[in-house]
Image (spheres, rainbow, N blue to C red):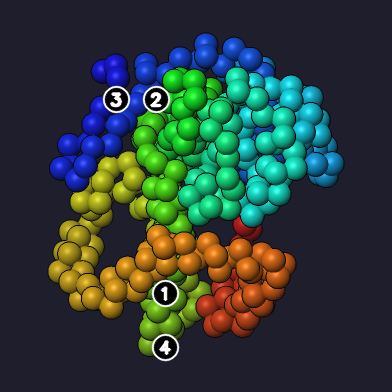
Amino acid sequence: MTGAEESSSGRGSLPVYFDEDANLDLLDDIVSIIGYGNQGRAQALNLRDSGVDVIVGNVRDQYWETAASDGFEVLEIREAVKRARFVMILIPDEVQPEVLEKSVLPVMTRNKILCFASGYNITFGQVTLPDDFDTILVAPRMIGVGVRDAYENDRGFYAFIGVHNNSSGMAMQYAMAISKGIGATKPSGALLEVTFRQEAELDLFNEQCFGPAFGQVLTTAVDVAVEAGYPPEAVLVEIYMSGELAYTMEKIAKMGTLKQLELHSPTSQYGSMSRGIRYANPELREQMQKSLGEIQDGSFAEEFAKEYELDLEILDDMKEMAQDVPIVVLDKEVRKKLRFRSDK
């Protein structure tokens, strides 16, 4: 079906686009990838493999060297922005304001398109942009190595796309073209149209609500089992080190939460469904709502800005303290005993 397909959930209309909706021919000029890290490298390689003319803008560090060894022309950021029509900002949120102010915005002209992979800085007022050029969002819901791996295996992936400023009248079409170039619209992929604010807040919600809550559940499960006398090695392997949990989550993504239950034994299905209500904790909902409120009102962004000014001192302290958390200590001991080899 050509054109946006809308959600039928009854919870509001969400336009969704597919490969036939995107026109790669719109990327008929140079695309500059600003930042050759996690997402930058993957998206640059995918765009080049899609036939797009790509250059890289980066500071002179190891990523500059990597981009050069991958065969890209690498330039100082300001020069890369000047040379390109499509400018893709793929550097970390916390360094974007300074880079934009010094090296990007001074050389942006009306015919250029500025593309972000995160709505964070615009949503929370960390940057202010003029309205005389297109500003768009293309945010893969996949880490960089996954973006590259999917492309090489002819698979698509989900991506959020959006428009902050539509000076040309073609901003959404450009967002779809870039998405197609990086491979998002290949088979099994789709583009979901959201606002910059929706992308930023949902991303933070996942990081600050679901992630920590899941971590507490995992930690509690390990503690309860070990305290009950089960061997730590067996507990960690059973709960997460075997990879079964990751595999189950993958099947949930592909099949749905209920359908994937059929992959498990009747014992597993009955136990999960009959005992699940015990963990419906009202306090969990309240804490998630509190964290979401801090995201929505900007107080988290303000807090993190202050933390960044302090060179992430509190973050470093928390990481150091985490080294002594029982599950972290236990995890290291078990991995050593089992001669566990981690994938980097």
Quadrant (top left, top right, bottom left, bottom right) of the N terminus = top left
Classify mark 4: residues with Cα within 10 Å, few (<14), some (14-19) or many (20+).
few
Query: Seen in the image, is 58 located left or right of residue 222?
Result: right
For disc 4, the marked residue is: 227
- Mark 1 vs mark 2, CA separation in Å: 36 Å
Q: Give SS at disc 1.
A: helix
Q: Residue at x 48, y 50 (%)?
A: 123
For disc 2, the marked residue is: 187
Which label lies toward us, 3 or 2?
A: 3
Q: Which mark is residue 216?
A: 1
- Mark 3 vs mark 2, CA separation in Å: 17 Å
Query: Seen in the image, is 36 located left or right of residue 274?
Result: right
Q: Give SS at disc 2.
A: loop
Classify mark 3: residues with Cα within 10 Å, few (<14), some (14-19) or many (20+).
some
Disc nearer the start of the sequence (3/4): 3
Q: Is residue 143 visible?
A: no
Nearest the eye: 105 or 163: 105
Which label lies toward us, 3 or 4?
A: 3
Determine contact: label 4, label 1, CB under 8 Å.
no
Q: Which mark is residue 305?
A: none
Residue type (three-letter) at the residue carrying disc 2:
Pro
Q: Give SS at disc 3.
A: loop
Nearest the eye: 240 or 296: 296
Disc nearer the start of the sequence (4/2): 2
Where residue 23 appears, as percent x and y from the top left, is 46, 14
Which label lies toward us, 4 or 1?
A: 1
Which label lies toward us, 4 or 2?
A: 2
- Mark 4 vs mark 1, CA separation in Å: 16 Å
Disc nearer the start of the sequence (3/2): 3
Number of marks in the rendered image: 4
Q: Residue at x 63, y 15 (%)?
A: 29
Residue type (three-letter) at the residue carrying disc 3:
Ala
